[in-house]
Image (spheres, helix red, strand yellow):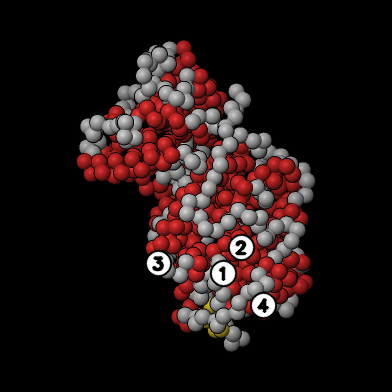
Amino acid sequence: MSLPCFKPLASTLIGQKLPLHKPSSIHHDDKPSLTKLYPSRRRVARMPINMALTTTDEQGITRRIGNHHPNLWDHDFLQSLPKSYDAPCYGERAEKVIKEIKGMFNALHLNSSSADDLYKRLSMVDDVERLGIDRHFQTEIKAALDYVYRYWDDMNGIGCGRESPCADLNTTALGFRILRLHRYGVSSGMLLQFKDNDGQFLCSNTLSNEELRSILNLYRASLIAFPKEQDLDDAKAFSTKYLKQVLPNINNTNISKEIKYNLEYGWHTNVPRLEARTYIDIYGDAKTTNNIYNSKLLELAKLDFNMIQSIQQRELQIVSRWWKESGLDKLEFARHRHVEFYFSAAGVCIDPKYSTFRIGFAKMCTFLTCLDDIYDTYGTLDELKLFTQAIKRWDLAFMEALPEFMKVAFKAFDEGVRSMAQEAEKTQERDKLNYARKAWEICIDSFMVEATWIATGYIPSLEEYLENGKVSFGYRVVTLQPLLSLDVPINDDIIKEIDYPSKFNDLLCLTLRLRGDTKTFKAEVDRGELASGIACYLKDNPRSTEEDALEYLNSLIDEKLKELNWEYLKPDNVPIISKYHKYALSKGIQLLYKERDGISVSDIQTKKLITKAMIEPVPI
């Protein structure tokens, strides 16, 4: 079935005073220089540095440091992971169960009652997706959704069955969410019929399972909103308030677990791997084992989770060995978060054949973080100027005059970029090394801009800050080469749709920069990094408070995420695998910033998530 056309949706910034969508000052053919970008730059006195966050090296140079905690994942521990589900017998059992479930999917077409045929199909699709096993049933999922879409009405939604006399909120909300995420053209206008004359959503407040599940699915649907979809904004406000109010009074513990999970993780921080691990527990408790379909789904979900975990443990061992061999483990001032970065990729990309993608992303993020720590804290301004020149020449010979820590960082970085280019050439059948280097050079230039801000104590306007910050966050460079390693050719026209200068890439980088700033700005001030989204907003709005700035940035994030949803889900000529993985990786990063800076401080919640997803198998 060809994808139906969406109607283009305009987007605006709520309360926006700044023209954030003017053409970027930083692009491929015009690298930024401070005098060119900011000719009227005002010099201000250097702000005092927190001396508790400095160290003196062997040459007597005082350097700023981040006081980051060390690597949490012992190399020997990772090498000892048992990979318990490597044996062929598990794969053979899984293949047998997959065939049985495919038969159950197909049986729906032969023995489907018109009373609930639509809901049954949607429920099956929802189950396999939340259990993390949907990649095995892509043909069956498409057939089920094509069937449901034939009966979809943008004005009225759908009932439980194709012959239902009236629409059902639970089926309609579930159908809207799943169909939209699979790029079927569905409108949110059908929600009007579930409101009263005052525009309020109707509910009985009975706390029945049916009522609770309807409101939960309404909430889940409301998260997949495009700009200017007021009905979905209303649905989100109503369902959020309703679910939070009734949660303490729910007797069904399984529904309450579902509600808690969805309220906590929403959509943009809900990574498939953690959802699968959580839903396996809920599904195992909630579904009766007398139902052969439910028991088969649960068996496959557990087997699949543990087999994938064994693959991920093997890849973790590779990443840890690489990290030690690269010498980056000796740079004590830098954040050592290679495991956390691998988790971000493995949480959203579980297909066994994409090992290079996951490992490559972990390496690129490790390089980015190390370079960021050099530019933001440890390097002096004079060293950074020489370091920037040396990197942009891509020649180790130009590193001789620099400190040892810069030599170690650049050597590992240069080798890593070259290695990923070789991997990409296998699938793209052409050399993209220079393209990747160009992207890194632009990122390094943005680092240098921020290093100069730090050295001079300069706080830019919010517009100026975000134009540079979208680049310096580094999301473009850490995703570019891993995406090129996927098993699908990506021509230059498609690269422009997922990379620079696409709006898709711009929104990904902007939302991540804004999200990061709302969680890191206090720690950055302690390190002497004064320019952040919060500080720049306060400079632009002197009478505002820190709370005002946070409210503004969070509102801006919400609006930009809606625009991002559209850019991700709109029909275009981009291979869905490339667009999905770039979008999904952002969810892995958003997860780390959900409550705090889970990259800089990963010894609490982040470690628990990694242990749950990649260390501890599901009991079978």
Is disc 2 in contact with disc 1, using a CB cutoff of under 8 Å?
Answer: yes
Disc 3 to disc 2: CB gap under 8 Å: no
Query: From mark 3 to mark 2, how far is it between C-alphas?
Result: 24 Å
Residue 438 seen from this side? yes
In front: 414, or 148? 148
Residue 383 got which mark?
4
* Among the 4 quarters of the image, the one containing residue 40: bottom right
Spot occupied by residue 152 in the image (x, y as percentages of width and height): 47, 22
Task: Tell us which disc is closer to us: 3 or 4.
Answer: 3
Residue type pointed to by label 4: Glu
Q: Position of residue 494 (x, y in %)?
A: 70, 41
Which residue is located at x 40 percent, y 54 percent?
608
Which residue is rendered at x = 42% and y = 23% of the image? 156
Q: Position of residue 98 (x, y in %)?
A: 49, 27
Label 1 environment density (alpha carbons within 10 Å; few <14, some 14–19, many ≥20): many
Mark 3 residue element = loop
Q: Residues within 10 Å of mark 4 (few under 14, many from 20)?
A: some
Which residue position holds label 2?
468
